[in-house]
Image (tube, grey):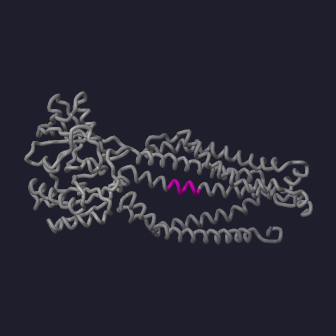
Amino acid sequence: MPAPLGATRGRIVWQLLLEAYAIVALGTAAGLLLAAWLTPTAATLAAHQLGGAIAGDVVLSWRVLIAIVGVSIVSATLCGLAPYLRTQSVRIDASRRGVTASRRQRLFRRGLIAGQVAIAFVLLVAVIVIGGSLRRILAVHRGFSADGVVAIAVSLPAAKYNTPARVTMFYRALQERVAGRLGTDAVTVADELPLTGDRGPALITAYTGGVTVDAAVRTVGPRYFALLRTAVRSGREFTSGDDPLAPPRVIVSRSLARALWPERDASGQRVRIGAAGAVADVIGVVEDVKLASIDRPDRPAVYFCAWQVPSNSAHVIARSPGTVADVLSVVRLEVAAMDPDLPVYGARWLTDVVARSPGVPARRLTTSAFGAFATLALVLAGIGLFGLFSHDVASRRRELALRVALGATPRVLRRAVFSQVGLMLALGLGAGVVMATLVAASLKSLLFGTRGTDPVTFLAAGGVVVLVALAAAAGPARRAAGSDPIVLLNAE
């Protein structure tokens, strides 16, 4: 040590701080370079999961840089002073010709490792329960198939298309032209896509019986349910004959049919739309479709035919083996041929609509973040365990060699190391279970179909932590088992 050689306390502290600042400066510089490289990727991910508006907020601003530098300086100062403060409780043991840490220091180091184990356990539990919730949400029956479906928005100005007849004529012609160009009849229109929200509801009253239900209202074209592969439970779906000359007709969801006519088939019944609205014939019953969110119950739905109740803003929907760009180019060409002033926008796969529906992006982003943190925590816990027991074995090499000389087997020495690992795991996992139970309450809004305190989840997370700990301690245990008293005596 420099102190016995005449170095002052100030010089020792300054040397320790310089070493700490140099190491932290290199780490901070590497971290900033990595952050600058990953920031565009993070912005793209955030835009994809949470919408394009948030992408501009994911930047490496000067405030972030100041915070990073400040934390780095504080960390370097604490790390630099810690070795000097430790010298106050370190004794030189002449009989062992070395420096031996006090019991308090050993307990402190083991406490830090146990804390890392607890944090890693909590993060793993969060990853498992939120990731499981995301998987369950995406597996929920949505009432439609999104694979291979492209949706493109078209908007007709009310000043020019000022009558229902003109709107209907435009969309009927557009549907036929796009279907002809794509070579498929799997083309339709709809005012809204599934999982994009629940517009203003309407009161639907059974014409006989007087039961009234608050239902979501959608306007769809012929072949809509066949295109989305939504099951028609009874009756039929809309056809080209359901036009303004035909009597008003609607299709109801299965939940609405059960609410209005629990003991009868809804097909052939009649409903009143609104408090004193028109009366319409029910021509079919379809499977319930998730209209607003996957993870919450939707209200019942009533569907009007787009040829009878047209909407100026609509989506052209097509099931095509091609790309979004292929379908978009066809729709643009046909719209331009019919009216070159109309905007065509919002081209996307329906699978992207599902991926960005309420509840999915937040869970996916949270799972990714917790997964990254859990991986980092596991790595740090593994490194900490490896370093701690490597140091412990090195500092106890004389004791271990003497135990070998007295007849201790390698198995006994390995057991001594792993028993210490087991003690720290027990402490860390015990604290982790308590922390995870408390954290589960704050994650309740992100859970779906599972509990944050599920015993199977705790066992799985604990198993991963135990495997990492055993792998980290395997090397030091092997070195402890290989202690040779002859080598030690020669060194003495």
Magenta residue span: 369-376
Q: Is residue 448 above or below residue 209?
A: below
Image coordinates for residue 338, horizontal then vertical, percent: 14, 65
Given residues 343 and 181, the one toward you in this image is 181
Residue at coordinates 63% horizontally, 45% vertically from top-left?
A: 429
Single out the residue that lies furthest toward the front. 183
Residue at coordinates 27% horizontally, 63% vertically from top-left?
A: 327
Residue at coordinates 29% horizontally, 42% vertically from top-left?
A: 231
Residue at coordinates 20% horizontally, 65% vertically from top-left?
A: 343
Q: In the image, is 206 to the left or to the right of 418?
A: left
Q: Indicate the quadrant containing the N terminus: top left, top right, bottom left or bottom right.
A: bottom right
Q: How many marks?
A: 0
Q: In the image, is 360 to the left or to the right of 160?
A: right
Which quadrant of the structure image shows residue 175?
Answer: bottom left
Image coordinates for residue 214, horizontal then vertical, percent: 23, 38
Given residues 449 and 5, the one toward you in this image is 449
Given residues 303 and 3, the one toward you in this image is 303
Magenta stretch: helix, strand or loop mostly: helix
Image coordinates for residue 12, horizontal then vertical, percent: 74, 69
Q: Is residue 22 above or below residue 135?
A: below
Q: In the image, is 112 to the left or to the right of 315?
A: right
Given residues 237 and 422, the one toward you in this image is 237
Is-magenta flag for residue 120? no
Q: Indicate the quadrant containing the C terminus: top left, top right, bottom left or bottom right.
A: bottom right
Q: In the image, is 355 to the left or to the right of 122?
A: left
Image coordinates for residue 467, horizontal then vertical, percent: 65, 50
